[in-house]
Image (cartoon, helix red, strand yellow):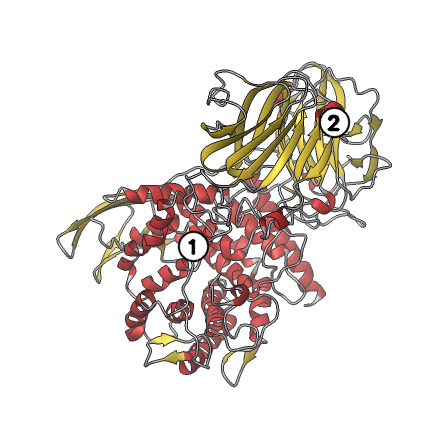
C-alpha cells in the first residue's frame, strides 16, 4: 500500500467513524474544535501503580451564578467510570473500544445543576490483570472536557481531587477453574463498608483530606497528537438502558424462614445476630442487571451473592432449569461486609448475569436488616418496532425467548454470551445484527461492530475473531463473516460512504485466502490460526477435517460464499474488474470442491477429497454456494435433514441450514425445523442456549435466529436490491394457516398478512412504505408490488 493510499484509507475511515458517532449523538452538540484539540487534561492519582487494580473517586466543586438550561460535557476514563452530579447518577462508560479508538460520552448535565455550588464526581476503576478480556486499557485515568468556554470550568486538571478507595478488592477470580470452562468477564467485588467513603458523591461530603489530581497528558482526538495514550473519538451508540427489575421469589432458605416480602419492598428482612443463613432467589428468567442491595446495621456481617444461569446436579448436569431441589449453585460472586450504618447501598461495579442468586449471610453481634434488594436491568436500548403472530401460538414463546436472548447479548458491543465472555465475535454478530435490523430497525450497534472488527485487523490482513479484546485470537472463517456483515449492511441500508470505506480491508481478507488456494485442486490448502466452523462433536475445537492440513470443503465453500457476496459489493461501487475476478475465483473453487468432494452415490458433500467423513455443514455450503447443481439441491437437502450419520449442525449453524433450504426452494420446511427451540423451552430455558445439552452458556444470541427468520423466511421479507431499494416477499408458511408480520424498513413499516386458501392458495395483504416496490412470489407465481396497500389472491 502506498503512503497516499494509506492516507486516503485513514481519511475515509475517520469520516465513517465520525458520521457514525454524530448519528448516535442525536441532538447532542459537539464543539467542532474538540475534534482536533481538548484543553482539559487526563488526570489520575499520584504514587499509585497506574496499571494495577484500583478503585478511585474524583470530585470537583464549582459555583454557577444561575442554573443553566444546557451544560454539555465530554467524559471518559480508563478502564471505566460512573458519573454523578450533585449526588445523582448521570451515566457510565466509556463504550468499549481500543486505544486507537477510545470513546468518550457527550452528556448534557444541565438538568442536574443548580445556582450556587455544584459537585461533579466520578468513580473510576481499573481491574488491572483481572480485567475482562473485552477490556483494553492503558492506565488508570479520567478526563472531562466542557463543550464550550462556559462549560470549561469543569475541565479536569485544576481544582479536581481524588481518593483511592481501599475498601475494594477483587474476588471470584478463579471462575474458570471452579466452573471448569472458559470464563473471562472479570472479577467480583469484595467491599468492606468500614473503610468506604460513604456519601463521596454528594455535595455535602468533606473532601478536604483528598489529594489533588495529577495531570498525565493532554487528550488527543483521533488523528491528532504526537505521543498519545488514547485516541479520543465520540461515542457512536446511545447510552445503555437502566430500569428497575424486581426479583419475584425466594425458592429455598436455610437457617431462616423468609417470605417474598423483602423482595417486593413490603417489609425489610431481618437476619438475627450470630446467624448463618442461605437463600436461593429466582428471577424466573435469565437477565443482565446491576444488583442493588440496601442494608442497615449488621456490623461485622458478611453477605455473599452468587450468580448463575442454572443450577447443576452434583455430577454437573443442568437438566430442567426450573428445578432446584438437589442441585448446587456454582457461579461468580460478590462479597459485601456491612459496617453497621443505615441505608448502605451495595452495587457491583459491573453488570451481573443471572437467573438465580444465592445469598449466603453470616451475622456477628448485631442483627442485619435488608431494606431492599432488586436489579437494575441494563443493556443496549433497543426498541421493538416489529411484530409477528400466527395461528400457532407457541411461536410467540419462541419469539419472546429469542428476543430476550438477543437483548441480553447486546450492550456496548454485541456479546456472544453475557455470563461467560461478553465478547463480540463476527460469527455471532452477523446473526445478531440481522435480528436487530429486522426487529428494531436500529443499525447503530451493527455499525459499531463493523468498525470494531475493522479496527482489529492484524498485519496479515485478517480481522481478529473477536474484538475488542486484550488477547489475540484470529479465526479466519470469522473474517469472512465480517465481509458478509458488510454485504448485509449494503443490502439493508443506503449508506454507501460507510460501506465503500471498507473495500480495501475486504480485499485484505479475500487476498489472505486467495494466497492459500491449492491451485492443483482448486481448493483451499492448509491454513493457520483457529479455523472454527461449529461446535460439532466430531471436530476438535470446532475445526472441521481439512481446515488445518488443507482441502476443507466447508471452509473452501465458505470462501466461495463470501466471494459471491464481495462481487456484489464491488460491483455496486463500479469496481467491475475485481467483482469479475471474485466471481471467476468462486466458480473455479465451486467446481473443484464439487468434483472432488461430492459423493453422488451417497448424495452428500464430503468434508475433504478423501470422502471419508461427512457433515451437514459441507452439503449446506454446497447448496448455498451453488456448487451442488440446482437439480440436485432438494435431494441433497433432504439427505441433510434426514441422514443422522452426517455430523450435525448446532443451533448456530442452523442459521445457514435455513439459508440453504431457501436456496433449494424448500423454505416451507423451516417451520418443521423449529423442534430444537421447542425442546429448549421444554427444559425450562428462558433464553436460548449455546449448544444442545450439556451446554456451557444458557444465553447465546447465535441461537436467536428465529427472530430473524420469522420475518425473512416465514414472512419471506428480503431486500431484492442494495439499500433495500426493492423488496422480495416470498412467504414460506409450512403448515401454518395464518401469519401476520410487521417490520421496520428505512422508509417506513412493511406490513404483511397471509391466509392459506386450500392446499395451494393464499390471500395476501401487503402494505409497503412510500417509494418501495418489488415482487410477491407464491408457488412459482410472481405479482408486482407497489407502495401502499394491496390485496392479492392466488
Identify the mark at residue 244; answer none if there is no mark. Answer: none
State the residue in front, 281 or 604. Answer: 281
Instruction: Name the quadrant of the C terminus.
Output: bottom left
Q: Is residue 595 above or below residue 684?
A: below
Percent from the top left, x then y, of residue 211?
A: 84, 27
Q: Report if residue 602 is visible in the image.
A: yes
State the residue in front, 187 or 310. Answer: 310
Along the horizontal axis of the image, is 460 left or right of 579? right
Q: Do the residues bearing badges 2 and 1 touch, measured as CB atoms within 8 Å?
A: no
Q: Is residue 257 above or below residue 543?
A: above
Percent from the top left, x then y, of residue 422?
A: 57, 47
According to the picture, the residue beneath numbered tag 2 turns out to be 154
Q: Residues within 10 Å of mark 1 (few under 14, many from 20)?
A: some
Q: Report if residue 717 is visible in the image.
A: no
Percent from the top left, x then y, of residue 226?
A: 80, 50
According to the picture, the residue beneath numbered tag 1 turns out to be 692
Along the horizontal axis of the image, is 740 left or right of 309? left
Percent from the top left, x then y, of residue 287?
A: 49, 37
- In this rendering, the label closer to the viewer, 2 or 1: 1
Residue 205 quadrant? top right
Residue at 78% over, 17% down: 206
Q: In this view, does 622 lie above or below 46?
A: below
Amino acid at each position: 500500500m502506498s503512503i497516499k493510499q494509506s492516507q486516503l484509507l485513514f481519511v475515509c475511515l475517520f469520516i465513517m467513524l465520525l458520521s457514525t458517532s454524530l448519528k448516535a449523538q442525536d441532538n447532542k452538540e459537539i464543539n467542532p474544535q474538540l475534534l482536533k484539540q481538548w484543553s482539559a487534561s487526563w488526570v489520575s492519582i499520584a504514587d499509585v501503580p497506574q496499571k494495577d487494580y484500583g478503585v478511585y473517586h474524583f470530585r470537583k466543586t464549582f459555583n454557577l451564578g444561575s442554573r443553566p438550561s444546557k451544560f454539555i460535557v465530554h467524559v471518559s476514563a480508563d478502564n471505566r467510570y460512573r458519573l454523578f452530579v450533585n449526588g445523582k447518577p448521570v451515566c457510565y462508560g466509556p463504550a468499549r473500544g481500543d486505544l486507537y479508538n477510545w470513546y468518550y460520552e457527550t452528556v448534557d448535565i444541565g438538568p442536574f445543576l443548580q445556582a450556587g455550588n455544584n459537585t461533579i464526581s466520578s468513580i473510576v476503576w481499573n481491574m488491572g490483570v483481572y480485567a475482562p478480556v473485552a477490556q483494553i486499557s492503558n492506565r488508570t485515568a479520567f478526563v472531562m472536557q466542557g463543550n464550550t468556554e462556559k462549560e470549561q470550568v469543569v475541565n479536569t486538571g485544576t481544582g479536581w481531587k481524588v481518593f483511592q478507595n481501599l475498601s475494594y478488592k477483587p474476588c471470584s477470580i478463579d471462575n474458570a477453574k471452579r466452573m471448569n470452562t472458559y470464563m473471562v468477564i472479570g472479577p467480583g467485588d469484595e467491599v468492606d463498608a468500614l473503610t468506604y467513603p460513604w456519601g463521596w458523591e454528594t455535595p455535602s461530603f468533606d473532601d478536604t483530606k483528598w489529594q489533588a489530581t495529577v495531570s498525565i497528558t493532554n487528550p488527543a482526538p483521533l488523528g491528532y497528537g504526537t505521543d498519545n495514550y488514547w485516541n479520543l473519538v465520540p461515542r457512536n451508540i446511545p447510552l445503555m438502558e437502566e430500569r428497575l427489575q424486581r426479583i419475584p421469589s425466594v425458592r429455598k432458605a436455610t437457617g431462616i424462614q423468609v417470605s417474598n416480602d423483602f423482595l417486593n419492598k413490603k417489609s425489610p428482612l431481618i437476619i438475627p445476630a450470630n446467624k448463618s443463613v442461605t437463600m436461593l432467589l429466582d428471577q424466573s428468567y435469565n437477565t443482565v442487571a446491576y444488583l442493588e442491595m440496601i442494608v442497615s446495621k449488621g456490623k461485622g456481617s458478611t453477605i455473599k451473592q452468587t450468580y448463575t444461569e442454572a443450577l447443576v446436579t452434583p455430577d454437573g448436569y443442568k437438566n430442567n432449569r426450573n428445578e432446584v431441589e438437589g442441585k448446587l449453585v456454582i457461579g461468580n460472586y460478590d462479597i459485601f461486609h456491612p459496617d453497621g450504618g443505615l441505608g448502605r447501598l451495595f452495587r457491583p461495579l459491573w453488570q451481573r448475569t443471572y437467573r438465580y442468586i444465592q445469598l449466603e449471610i453470616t451475622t456477628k453481634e448485631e442483627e442485619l436488616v435488608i431494606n431492599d434488594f432488586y436489579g437494575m436491568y441494563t443493556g443496549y436500548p433497543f426498541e421493538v418496532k416489529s411484530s409477528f403472530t400466527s395461528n400457532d401460538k407457541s411461536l410467540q414463546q419462541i419469539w419472546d425467548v429469542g428476543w430476550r436472548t438477543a437483548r441480553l447479548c447486546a450492550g456496548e458491543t454485541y456479546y456472544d454470551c453475557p455470563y461467560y465472555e461478553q465478547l463480540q465475535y463476527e460469527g455471532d454478530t452477523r446473526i445478531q445484527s440481522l435480528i436487530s435490523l429486522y426487529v428494531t430497525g436500529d443499525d447503530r450497534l451493527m455499525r459499531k461492530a463493523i468498525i470494531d472488527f475493522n479496527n482489529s485487523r492484524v498485519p496479515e490482513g485478517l480481522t481478529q475473531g473477536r474484538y475488542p479484546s486484550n488477547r489475540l485470537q484470529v479465526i479466519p472463517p470469522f473474517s469472512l463473516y465480517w465481509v458478509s456483515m458488510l454485504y448485509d449492511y449494503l443490502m439493508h441500508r443506503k449508506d454507501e460512504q460507510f460501506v465503500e470505506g471498507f473495500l480495501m480491508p475486504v480485499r485484505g481478507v479475500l487476498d489472505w485466502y486467495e494466497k492459500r488456494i491449492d491451485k492443483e485442486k482448486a481448493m483451499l490448502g492448509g491454513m493457520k490460526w483457529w479455523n472454527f466452523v461449529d461446535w460439532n462433536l466430531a471436530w476438535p475445537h470446532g475445526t472441521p477435517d481439512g481446515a488445518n492440513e488443507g482441502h476443507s470443503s466447508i471452509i473452501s465453500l465458505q470462501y466461495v460464499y463470501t466471494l459471491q457476496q464481495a462481487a456484489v459489493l464491488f460491483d455496486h461501487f463500479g469496481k467491475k474488474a475485481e467483482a469479475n475476478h471474485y466471481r471467476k475465483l468462486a466458480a473455479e473453487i465451486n467446481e473443484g470442491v464439487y468434483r472432488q468432494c461430492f459423493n453422488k452415490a451417497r448424495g452428500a458433500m464430503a468434508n475433504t477429497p478423501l470422502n471419508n467423513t461427512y457433515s451437514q455443514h459441507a452439503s449446506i455450503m454446497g447448496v448455498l454456494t451453488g456448487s451442488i447443481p440446482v437439480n440436485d439441491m432438494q435431494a441433497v437437502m433432504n439427505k441433510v435433514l434426514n441422514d443422522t450419520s452426517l455430523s450435525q449442525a448446532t443451533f448456530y449453524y442452523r442459521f445457514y441450514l435455513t439459508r440453504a433450504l431457501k436456496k433449494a426452494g424448500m423454505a416451507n420446511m423451516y417451520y418443521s425445523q423449529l423442534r430444537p427451540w421447542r425442546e429448549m423451552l421444554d427444559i425450562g430455558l428462558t433464553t436460548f442456549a449455546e449448544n444442545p445439552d450439556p451446554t456451557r452458556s444458557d444465553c447465546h444470541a447465535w441461537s436467536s435466529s428465529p427472530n430473524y427468520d420469522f420475518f425473512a423466511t416465514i414472512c419471506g421479507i428480503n431486500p431484492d436490491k442494495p439499500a433495500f431499494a426493492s423488496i422480495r416477499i416470498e412467504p414460506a408458511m409450512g403448515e401454518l394457516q395464518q401469519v401476520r408480520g410487521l417490520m421496520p424498513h428505512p422508509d417506513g413499516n412493511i406490513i404483511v398478512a397471509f391466509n392459506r386458501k386450500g392446499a395451494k392458495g393464499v390471500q395476501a395483504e401487503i402494505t409497503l412504505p412510500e417509494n418501495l416496490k418489488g415482487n410477491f412470489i407464491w408457488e412459482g407465481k410472481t405479482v408486482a408490488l407497489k407502495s401502499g396497500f394491496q390485496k392479492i389472491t392466488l
